[in-house]
Structure formats: C-alpha cells, structure tokens
Image (cartoon, rainbow, N blue to C red):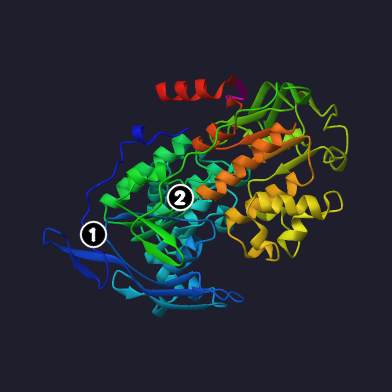
Amino acid sequence: MVSTAHFPFQRRDVLRGDRGGSHGRSGLGVAVTMSLVLERIFCRYPGHAAPVLRGIDMSLASGSTTLISGSTGSGKSTLSLILCGAIPNLIDRLESGGRVVVDGEELTLLPMRQVARKVGLLMQNVEHQLFTDRVEDEVAFGLENMGVPAREIESRLATALQAVGANHLRGRALGSLSSGERQRVMLAALVSLGQSLLVLDEPLAYLDRHGTAALFNALGDLSRAGKTIVVFEHRRDLVRTAVDRELWLGDGRLLDTAPAVPSLPRFEGCASPAESRLICENVSFLRGDLPILRELCLEVRAHESVVLLGDNGAGKTTLLRLVLGLEKTRSGQISVCGLDPGRIPTRQLALNTALVLQNPDHQLFLDTVRAEVTSARTGTDAARAELEALGLCGLAERHPQSLSTGEKRRVTIAAALARHPKLLLLDEPTVGQDDASLALVVRRLHAYVNQGGALLVTTHDERAARALGSRIVLLREGRVIDRSVDDHFVLTRAR
C-alpha cells in the first residue's frame, strides 16, 4: 500500500497562470510562459442532448503538474483525448470545438506526426497502446518512429526504464507482464520521448506502492525539466501532495474546488465464517521458467471477504485464473465449492463462481447494459436489483462500449452478482470509480458477503482494501501472509 508521506516528491511552488494567452504573470510580477492553453473547449457525443464538455478554458505554465479529477463519466478521458489532439484529428464522429495550444501552436492545425512530438498520452487501458512483443521494443517503438539514432535510443531507453522503476523488466515478453508492469513500460515509453506535455489518464490504476513512488519521482524530474503534466486520477488523496494545482471536472466545466474525499464504510460482518468455498493447498505455478506461486495455501469461507494484496507481478491475477481453471497448476490442489477446477469444464465451475476481470472490455458483448446484466440464469428482477444497487439504472439502455471505464466495470460487477455466485472473484474492481461509485460498490459487496457469499478481491487501492476486507492476504515471493486488516496496515506503515 502507498503512503505519500514516504515519497520524496512533494508539492512544489511553481509559477503558473490562470486563463488566456500564451504568457501570463505570477503574483510576484514575473513573466510566466504558458505551455498549454485551452480556449472554449466543447464536446458532445452523438445521440446525447447534453455536451460532455462545455466551454472549458485553462492555462498551464511550463513545469507545472495539475491534477484533474471528477465523477465517473464526467468527461475526463474525453478531455485527455482532446489535449493530445486525438479529438478531433483522429476521432471526428462527434461535435467538438475550441482551441488547444501547446507551446504556442494550435494542435488542430498540425499533422498528427507533429502533435505526437509535442504531446504524450498514457491511456486508461494501456493494452490499447502496446504494439510490440518485448519490453525494450515497446520503449524503443516511438523513438524509432521519430528517427532517433540507434545509439541514442539505447541511452534513452535505459534512462526511461530506470526513471519509472522498470529496469527489472528488461528482456521480458509483454504478454508475461501484469497490468501494473505493462503500465510502467508504457510510462517509460512516454518518458523516453521527451514531449513537452504529458497527459496521464488514471496512471495509478494498477501500480503497486513501488511503481507509484517511482512514478511520482519521475514526475518531479520531468517537472523540474520544464515539462507540463496533466494527471487525471480518482485517487485524489494519494496524488494531491505531488501536484501544484487540483481541479474538478463537473457538469462539463473545470472548477477550482473539489468535494471532500468521503470515508468508506468498513466491513463489519454478520456471521462467523462457515463452509469453505475455496481451498488452495500447496499450489505452485511456473510461467516459463519463472516461479510465480510456491506451495501457496489459502482458504476462503462463506461470509468472508478476503483482500489479496501484492506487488505488480506477484501472481494475484494468476491465482484468480488458477481458481477458475483458466491456468493449470504445476503442483498442489485447488477446491472450489468442493470441485477441482482442473478436472471439470469451466462452464460447470461457473454455476457457483463468477470472475470479474481487470479489463471490462473482455467481458462486455451485448448491445445494452440491461442485456449484459440479465441472463437466463438471473432474470429481470435480479438484474434490476443489481442495476439499482450499483447506480446503473440511468445507463440501462446504453451500449456498454459507450460508457466510461468505471461505468463498464460496475456493469461487469452487476452481471456477476446477478447470478448469485457462492464464490466471487474480483480483479481490481475499484479502478475508475469516483468516491460515490466506490461507496456503492463497497456497500453492495458487503451485502453479498453478509448474505453468505465468499469474496476474494485484488486491489492496489488502500482505501478499498480497508473498506472491503474482513482479512488481508499478502502475496509475497509466491506465498501468502495472512493478516487482519488493521494489523496489515500498521505493519505496512512501519516498513
């Protein structure tokens, strides 16, 4: 888990302007160069009466770092695509307007190859940005496209991997990496390019505490080098000490004040743990020649909510896949509701279990949200109840692929819960959730466990772990360390 108190990169006093023009003055009367200027930014999606962005104006100084947060579906990712020129240069099937000026040049007047030299974007879903098979090839990809000499490419590649704490990933295939590790590789690729504006959409989503610390240190170095950084992130309490300015995107406009971060309800439980729903006995797993799990033992019972923590690449997602028989163990035994997942078809195992993947796009196939949540096994009443519990009623007739990442994730959680599984596996379910949506998810999962469900959930979000867990299981060096929630965070703070 991450505590910003341990990060050497803290909020800096950086001169910055507010609105208008490519130059401004600080409160001391010193001229400030505006690296990024937005004027009257407007955007409306087809079929929507209300615009998602309504005349946004903003000016950011060179060397500044700005946090923009907002409710799920408020338009943060849309604004990130406008900042990097993808809207309207590449995505033009919507109504948009206004000017984006970077280093004195308007992006809509430039070819995308020139825009790419000025602006770098880290997308919410890094899978959309990966083009090669290996770590070094991915970091070098953009440099090669820009015609950087081979000797300089190697130097920049090494520096960038070091900057984001990803040196240990050299030589690895991207397909063997966890989501957090891939996120670090993509960050290294952006750092290597040296663009003057960096736009990061949910950069902490899958990073462990080491990756988060490395990211904040890298942002500090980039800012001191004069780069302008815009961070879109829901985890405001974690990021705000590392930025110069915090803005809130609400009702299509940028506001200088954001609502307070509310506390989340803690899991209290209503019954003692009962029958075993998951038993792992001495489970080992290799990926190639790399040991991931080593004689792991774990039990999850009915009325239990177990939060699985661990660094990027520790094997959390691998364990969930083993439980559902999507991977094969090297040795050991797994029992899921009394069944061996390695010996029965996955469809039979799915009668009592449900898995929500990290990437919701991999589980959304139908034309409406309502259809995704409704199935022959659930029926309309169960679907309606889950839509209401997770704040999705107003989105029921929308196409799932038109939703924000956080909304998509709640749809997949609703679809899983509507089947009333005895064992529910959730892989990073809180990514993309604003405070209100996160509270809905937490309350619904509390109810599921109190009604007799068994929950195993992975997360890098400390607030979510505290709220969801009846106990913590830390995955380290392929084995588990079982702790109470409070004991885990006391020990983590002491490290």
Q: Amino acid at mark 2?
A: Leu
Which range is magenta?
Answer: 476-481
Instruction: Name the residue carrying label 1.
Output: 16
Q: Report the Cα–Cα distance between label 1 and label 2.
A: 25 Å
Residue 209 lies in the magenta stretch: no
Image coordinates for residue 152, horizontal then vertical, percent: 37, 53
Q: Residue at x 59, y 34 (%)?
A: 468
Secondary structure under the numbered disc 2 in the rendered image:
helix
Q: Where on the picture, by quarter, is residue 102?
A: bottom left
Q: How many C-alpha atoms fall within 10 Å of the one at disc 1: few (<14), some, or many (≥20)?
A: many
Image coordinates for residue 106, horizontal then vertical, percent: 35, 76
Secondary structure under the numbered disc 1 in the rendered image:
loop
Q: Amino acid at mark 1?
A: Arg
**Can residue 495 be seen in this snapshot?**
no
Q: Residue at x 61, y 36 (%)?
A: 458
Residue 325 in the figure: left or right of residue 40:
right
Instruction: Name the residue carrying label 2.
Output: 187
User: Residue 273 or 240: which is nearer the viewer?
Assistant: 273
